[in-house]
Amino acid sequence: MPRPPVPTGNSQADLMERYERDRLSFLMAATRAHGPMVELTRGTVLVNDPAAVHEVLRRTNTDFLVTSNIRRDEVSGLRGDPGTEAWMRGRRATQKGMAPLGLREHGTWLASEAGRLRTGWLERGDIADPVRELEALTARSFSRFCFGTRDTGAVPAHTGRLLDAITPIIASPFHFPGVIRRFMPRYRRSVTAQRRLERELHRAVRAPGEGGLVDVLTAAGLDTEVTVSMLVSNGLASYRVPATVLTWTLVALARHPEIADECAEAVRRTRPGTTPDIVRWVLAESLRLWPPNWLILRTANGEQTCGDWRIPDSAAVMISPYVVHRTAPTFEDGPEEFRPHRWAKIEPAAGEYLPYGMGSRWCIGKPLADLELTTLLTCLVGEVRFTVRRMADRPDVRTTLLPVDLVLKAERR
């Protein structure tokens, strides 16, 4: 069984330079030139074949490991390791906390907050960097959902500061040994930011009040350290990801006013609390074209086989939902085009559509994210018409896939 093909004629330094120049274009070009399985350099395998993607993610925690945390510190990632087992217990408890009843009650609050945001945007007209404003709302949403009636204090603010602190670390293509990293200013800043957030989370968990995800995690028998660890990780994801998805969706609707009009009309005809099909299709298509988590990383735990290929021991395995969503057979009709109506008749095969990942490490916050996206988009698109005033050609890919230098114009319908 062969290893994936290795491109010839380029040194590792050349490939790194091209990757840093435009990461998304580099990954797309490598897949088109060499196929969906390619060993970019010895020990770094790009996997974008849907069946192979499904295999890698399905076999996470056994054959393919998550070997770093939010600061890229090394962790085991192996099933049976105490740290991994505690993390997975936390994930299972969090998943139980995403109960429909709690989500419905939270949706009522969220709709009210979305109405305030809509009013403010219509009064101002021009919205510079809408991601930041949506981040503030989704951060408050996550804190309320987690802590119920408890005082969350500065949790949202400290979450944002930690995200800003870890961005340079995640964005860097260079990985330094731990003994060196500990003395790097950006690494030390991230440690300080995380400690401050953890202290605030400990305070909020102990604060008077009840309800929310914290009660579910406590009832599951998780100790406070594991609970806080889950809140840090999920809080970082919830802070930016829904805001980014919604922003890309508003950009797409601004550029396709006929679809925006169809959404608005469907919202008017639909009873409150119900999401029209066209709104769901628009969000699915936005997640296809601009998946927030555009790169998923795993490490081969020993030599592995994946489809017809052999992956070497300790290889870094790269999966790009951005590439998969543009090359998978289901999306071969206009893969670069915004076509929400395709979702009325397609059913992606396993490994073809993964905006929330899949396997044992899929995004457990998906139910909350779906609620936030449908509630906010329904509230905004029903009464507001958006126009793109300005936006850079290339997105920011340092962490989440972000629009750059974006200014939207909001007008009442």
Image: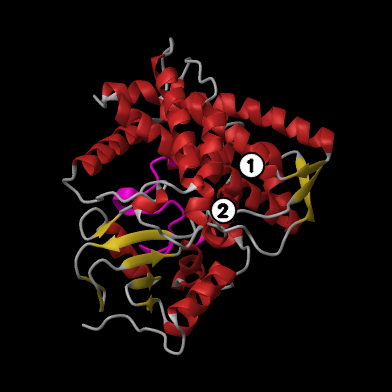
Label 1 vs label 2: CA separation?
12 Å
Mark 2 neighbour class, 10 Å CA radius: few under 14, some 14 to 19, many 20 or more: some
* Element assignment for label 1: helix
Q: Check whether the beta carbons of the residues at disc 1 and disc 2 lie within 8 A of each other.
A: no
Question: Which region is colored magenta?
Answer: 345-365
Q: Nearer the viewer, mark 1 or mark 2?
A: 1
Q: Estimate the x, y position of residue 109 in percent, counting from the top left.
A: 58, 24
Membership of 165 in magenta stretch: no
At label 1, the amino acid type is: Leu
Residue 11 vertical placement versus 116 (above, below): below
- Residue highlighted by disc 1: 377
Note whether 69 is above or below 225 in the view shown: below
Q: Is residue 332 left or right of residue 362?
A: right
Task: Left or right? Give the position of 263 relative to 359.
Answer: right
Q: What is the x, y in percent for residue 204?
A: 44, 19
Amino acid type shown at disc 2: Trp
